Image (cartoon, grey):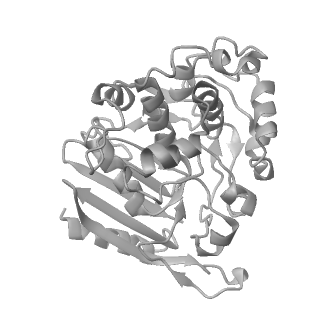
Amino acid sequence: MTFERVGEVLRQQQAQGRFPGGQLVVRHRGREVVSVAVGVARGFRESEGVAPVAVTAQTRFSVFSASKAVVALAVAMLEDRGVLDVSAPVAQYVPDFAANGKGELTVLDVLTHRAGVFTPELDANPRDWPHDDRVHAALVAATPRWPRGTLAYLPYEYGWILAEVFRAASGRRLDDFVRDEIAVPAQLPGLRFGATLEELPSLARTYWLGTGSVMVAGRDLTPTFEHDNNLPEALTAFVPAAGIICDATTLAGFYEVLLRGGVCASGKRLLSEATLQRYTTGASLAFDRSNRLPLRMARGFLLGTRTPSIYGWWGTQRCFGHAGAFSALGWADPDHELAIAIVTN
């Protein structure tokens, strides 16, 4: 399939009603070879009371759990600098996290979604997300649902726990670190968590087009997904596991840095290639109790497989990246030197 054909497929999918609007960017050996923006960003439903607004290459979308890979890179950079020991218990950095049987859970357990800790009431109440004290209290109160070592994808908890560990280990907020230590040297100013209130009218609105129930970590997302993810509180809060709002150009640019072994186009190295390799390779395939399907999970990155995966039909085991809420996907394909991002609403 040619690069041009890939862009045409996205246009056909939008015309078929698969999504209201979206973007596709493909970078190959440092060059942008596909850039498509199609459909509507807002005004898809008459009930919105606004005229349809076309998607452009600059339209920012919520990429949801595709954010997890950015969190993983920040954690990897701290490990690379000797600031953070991922084999240590979370409670070494956040002592009261040990409550309710969580004392042995390590940072690595969280990175690989094997901690079994869920906060369903917090997940379902986005108006609590901007309040660090409420997030912290929910993490402390949580009791592991699965035994340590069981693969059970953590939709939001992954980010909240790692952000607390990050701040305790480094003295810095994770979102500030991403801005200063990743986005600036990588020349990706759009790689950031959340939006300001003034920016909200310019963002792509999130829609739910599903026709049946979708369960993740035991919670049905269907009834409230569209409402919750368009709330100002959700869009302006720092939600590390699911809160980056960016365009496909930015997301593909992030993966291009990783394709170069953690080296920015300017020549600035973010971390050693050896540390990056530990995060993007070496995962085992296991059954995920949250999504009820097999996943090949590394340290914060979803890996491809020999059989069909989210990255292609066959032989994608060297691909690494992350999907987000059935609507976004960013990944690197080292075998073909590709950095790819698909974002839709």
Q: Is residue 214 visible?
A: yes
Q: Quadrant of residue 298?
A: top left
Q: Quadrant of residue 36?
A: bottom left
316 vs 90, left or right, is left
- Residue at 27%, 37% (x, y): give it: 261
Q: Is residue 312 visible?
A: no
Q: Position of residue 336 (x, y in %)?
A: 19, 47
Along the line of sight, the residue nearer the viewer: 170 or 114:
170
Decide: is 239 above or below 297.
Answer: below
Q: Position of residue 85 (x, y in %)?
A: 51, 17
- Residue at 73%, 43% (x, y): give it: 123
- Residue at 59%, 48% (x, y): give it: 242
Q: Position of residue 288 (x, y in %)?
A: 53, 31
91 vs 19, left or right, is right
Decide: is 179 above or below 203.
Answer: above
- Residue at 27%, 51% (x, y): give it: 265
